[in-house]
Each structure stands twice: as C-alpha cells, then as structure tokens.
Image (cartoon, rainbow, N blue to C red):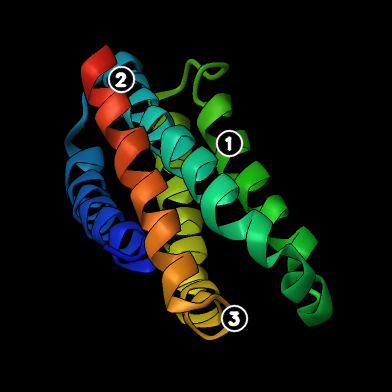
C-alpha cells in the first residue's frame, strides 16, 4: 500500500467522525460531554498528524517551501489544537460546543487542503517505490500502536 492510500483511508475515518461530531454536538447536555468528544478528536488527530508529518510532510518540505505553504500547514494544526484546548478552560456549554465545531471546521479545511495539495504533490514528487516504502512504515507504526493498546 502506498502512503497516500493509507492516509486517505484514515481521512475517510476522520470525515465520518467529523460528520458525527457535527450532528451530536448540538444535543450534548454538559461541558463534560463536549470535553470527552474533544479529547477523542484531539487524541486521534495527534497520532494522525505525527505519522503524516514524519512520513509525508517532511519528505515534501522543500516543495511546500516553494509553494509558500510550509508555515500555513503548521498554523492550521495550531489553530485546531488551540480550539480543542480552549474547551478545557471554559465552563459555558455553548462556548464549549462552539469551540468543538470550530475545531471540526478547521480540521475539515486542513484535510481538504491535504487531499487537494499534499497528496497529489506526494504522488508527483515521490517515486512509486518511495511511496510504497513509506506505506510500509505506516503499516508498521499502526501495527505497533495496536500491539501497545
């Protein structure tokens, strides 16, 4: 499996989660419920981001610099993290819900950009062999995560 195929498969899971969060958030009754969902999203995004950064973004960093997108991707990650972290400092249910939806919106925007820019760039810049090797590294990391769970 090539790295882009693996990461796109993860994106499908995230899009399903984003859909669920957008439907469920208005019905949440407590800040604790919002925080629990925010923690779930943060945990999943963190692992995905680390793997994606190490296996795909780093090899393509020079191309991102040429496109002027290198800092932009990092800023989007920071914005998502800021919204999720802010949920833990508010006591207002409406504010917590708004922050969770903002985190989802920013995540969708970021994922869309990866799917439109990063993944096609990877397929263009990286040889098929490199893509397959990175996909193998992805598989090994995921197996290790499952074994540690």
Residue 36, labelled with which disc? 2
Q: Earlier in the sequence, mark 1 or mark 3?
A: 1
Give the Cα distance between marks 1 and 3: 29 Å
Secondary structure, mark 2, is helix
Q: Where in the figure is residue 147, as x and y percent of width and height? A: 22, 18
Q: CA distance from mark 2 to mark 3?
A: 39 Å
Proximity of marks 2 and 3: CB atoms separated by less than 8 Å: no
Image position, residue 114 (x, y; %): 50, 69
How packed mark 3 is, by other alpha carbons closer than 10 Å (few <14, some 14-19, many 20 or more), is some
- Residue 125: give its label: 3
Q: Quadrant of the C terminus?
A: top left
From the image, which quarter does the N terminus lie in? bottom left
| Label 3: element kind | helix
Instruction: Say few, some or many: other residues with alpha carbon within 10 Å of mark 2 (under 14 / 14 to 19 / 20 or more).
Output: few
Tell me what residue is drawn at x 54 percent, y 79 percent.
117
Residue tagged 1: 81
Left or right, 32 with reference to 68: left
Task: Sort mark 1 into few (<14), some (14-19) or many (20+) by Cα contacts within 10 Å.
Answer: some
Measured along the vertical axis of the image, is residue 62 above or below residue 141?
below
x%, y% of residue 42? 43, 31
Residue 41, placed above or below residue 69: above
Q: In front here: 7 or 141?
A: 141
* Foreground label between 1 and 3: 3
Q: Is residue 126 left or right of residue 142?
A: right
Q: Residue at x 50, y 50 (%)?
A: 52
> Left of 52 or right of it: where is 137?
left
Along the viewing direction, whichever of 98 and 5 lies nearer the viewer: 5
For image coordinates 50% across by 44% down, the residue present is 49
Q: Residue drawn at (50%, 25%), measured in percent from left and top?
A: 87
Instruction: Kindly give the residue lying farthest to the front in the view shown.
Output: 129
């Amino acid at each position: 499996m090539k790295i882009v195929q693996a990461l796109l498969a993860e994106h499908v899971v995230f899009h399903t989660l984003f859909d669920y969060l957008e439907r469920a958030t208005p019905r949440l009754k407590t800040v604790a419920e919002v925080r629990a969902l925010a923690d779930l999203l943060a945990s999943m995004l963190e692992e995905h981001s680390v793997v994606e950064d190490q296996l795909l973004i780093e090899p393509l960093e020079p191309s991102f610099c040429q496109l002027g997108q290198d800092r932009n991707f990092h800023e989007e990650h920071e914005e998502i993290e800021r919204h999720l972290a802010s949920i833990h400092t508010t006591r207002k249910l409406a504010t917590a819900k708004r922050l969770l939806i903002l985190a989802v919106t920013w995540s969708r925007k970021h994922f869309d950009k990866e799917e439109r820019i990063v993944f096609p760039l990877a397929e263009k810049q990286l040889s098929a062999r490199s893509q397959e090797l990175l996909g193998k590294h992805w598989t090994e990391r995921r197996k290790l995560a499952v074994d540690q769970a």
